[in-house]
Image: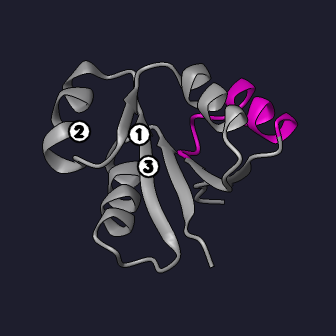
Amino acid sequence: MKNIRVGVIGVGNIGSAHAKAIADGKVSGMVLSALCDISTERFARFPQEFPDCTYYTNYEELIKRINDSEEKWLILVESKKQGKQLEEMIADSCFTFRESKH
C-alpha cells in the first residue's frame, strides 16, 4: 500500500512534535511531505529539521498542491488553526485531524 502524504499546518509545539514523529518513521504508512507556518522563525528552521518537505507560509498554497495531486493526504491542524482553513480542506475532500484538548 502506498504511503499517505502528511502536511502540518501550524508547526508550534504540538505541530512540530507530530511532524518529527512522522519524519522519524514512528508512524507507519505516512510520509511527512509539507509544513506550513506563518512564523518566519519557525520557517527558517524547517530545512535543517525536515529536509524532505516542501515549506509554505500560506496554507492556501498547500491546499492547492493537495487539490492538484492524485495522492491521498492527511492534514494535521493545531486546534487554534480552525475556521476557514479547516472548512476549505473539508470542502476539498482532504482528510484532516485537528488537535484539541476537549
Q: CA distance from mark 2 to mark 1?
A: 8 Å
Q: Secondary structure at mark 3?
A: strand
Binning the other alpha carbons within 10 Å of mark 1 as few (below 14), some (14 to 19) or many (20 upward) gives many
State the quadrant of the N terminus: bottom right
Near-viewer residue (25 or 17): 25
Q: Is residue 10 above or below residue 95?
A: above
Closer to the N terminus: mark 2 or mark 3?
A: 3
Quadrant in which residue 36 is drawn:
top left
Residue 21, x across and y down, in percent: 34, 68
Q: Hey, what amino acid is under mark 3?
A: Ser
- Choose mark 1 or mark 3, whichever is in front: 3
In the rendered image, residue 62, in percent from the top left (x then y), is placed at 56, 30
Magenta stretch, residue numbers:
77-92
Q: Which mark is residue 46?
A: 2
Location of mark 3 (residue): 33
Image check: 2 left or right of 27? right
Q: CA distance from mark 2 to mark 3?
A: 12 Å
